[in-house]
Amino acid sequence: MRASSTLSGMDKRRLAIIFAVVFVNVLGFGLILPLLPYYATRFGASPLMIGLLTASYPAAQIIGSPILGRMSDRFGRRPILMVSIAGTAVSFLILGSAAALWMLFAGRVLDGLTGANFTVAQSYITDVTAERNRARGLGLTGAAFGLGFIIGPALGGLLSQWGYSVPAYVAAGVATLNIVLVALFLPESLTEERKAELAAQPRGGVTAKRLLEALRRPLFGDAIQLRFFFGVAFATFQAMFSLWALKHLGLGPQAIGLLLAYVGILSVIVQLALIAPLTKRFSEGLLLVVTLGVAGVSFFAWGVSPNVPVLLVVLTPLCFALSIQNTVSQSVLSKTVGPTEVGGAFGLSSAVQNVGSIAAPIIGGAIIGGLGTWAPGLLAGILCLGLVPFAWNKFAKPGTAFSVPPQAAEPESIGA
């Protein structure tokens, strides 16, 4: 628990800046996301190879995210954010100048190694929010993420008419702007006392021994497992959506960009308008269970959607469920560790999720080519529905730690 349950004007200003940082970062990522299948196809990549290209990013994040998350605990959020964003800018330059498929892989790997932007931003949020308002604070980063997906993919699709390299170069410029934003306007969130505490923590990265120890910790291990399997389902949808839309509906980059913008709009609505009242009225455990069920059914429907109008209907409950699930599960995870462990916890969570995110696009690309475009939706749906009883027993059943709604936030707190 934080020493104070309220936020000062300075804290609220920091949250506003973090919102802007995440938004600008996701804007750059969204510029190139819908174009990767087309970019790779230009170099003769098969659906399986496109899956491998998509998987190269989370594979690199397994190495980069825990290290950068832990470094942000030790040296501060601000400098690590700047290093991470700089790596992203260089990776986009590589993508823009790609003359062969291996350069696309190189760009995605570099971005994965240095791309802990979102993890560090979430750690920053936990530094300046009270536990009872944690979900609402993290919801701000989710809203920024969604807003970036409203503008980024649509703009990327528009820019692609002048060549696939143009959105990549624009994304590099956006990332450079983000570095300036952090350098000039974002103060450090860790106090000297906190840095001293963190300096005494054991050093080292993610090893099999550390992972097993973490998974054995009550609640934290359960939250990590939930994040892992949900992450596989979410990654299947995220990584395969553009390829699915190309193969299943025959859509081009512009149409896919607009669909992803629609997803972003739904995400922003959830994060800004629904997270606060939902987490105030219902327990986080119950929200986990309900959204897993809704996501599972919606994934099935996504895989077999016959046209764009039906797809838009299906995407509505799916995006609402995914947005709430992702934010609430992150909030739950942050409350299972001490305040000096949050950055490392988010880094470990990201690494574990990325293990699943490696397999998801590879399997998704293979089953689209081998079974049909309906197969990724079936896989993601089964994973989410299979998590429902687990989430109920660990987090929602009466008597469990997260089965009771949190107390109402004080008037001057986030979301008041």
Image (tube, rainbow, N blue to C red):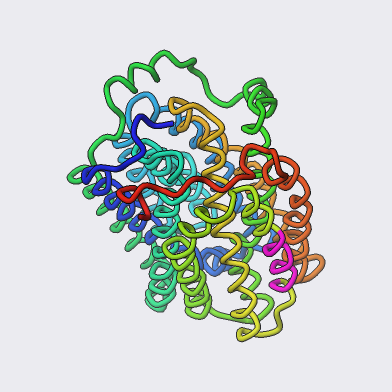
- Where, by quadrant of the figure, is residue 14 drawn? top left
Q: Position of residue 380 (x, y in %)?
A: 72, 59
- Range of residues picked out in magenta: 293-302
- Where, by quadrant of the figure, is residue 363 drawn? bottom right
Q: Position of residue 287 (x, y in %)?
A: 62, 54
Q: For the point 56% across and 38% down, which residue is it?
A: 333
Q: Position of residue 170 (x, y in %)?
A: 32, 63
The quarter of the image holding the C terminus is bottom left
> Depth check: 177 or 380 in front?
380
Task: Please identify the dominant SS of the magenta region.
Answer: helix
Q: For the point 75% across and 66% down, which residue is it?
A: 369
Q: For the point 38% across and 59% down, which residue is it?
A: 28
Q: For the point 75% across and 52% down, which residue is it?
A: 388
> Depth check: 137 or 68 in front?
137
> Depth check: 197 or 181 in front?
197
Q: Position of residue 358 (x, y in %)?
A: 64, 47
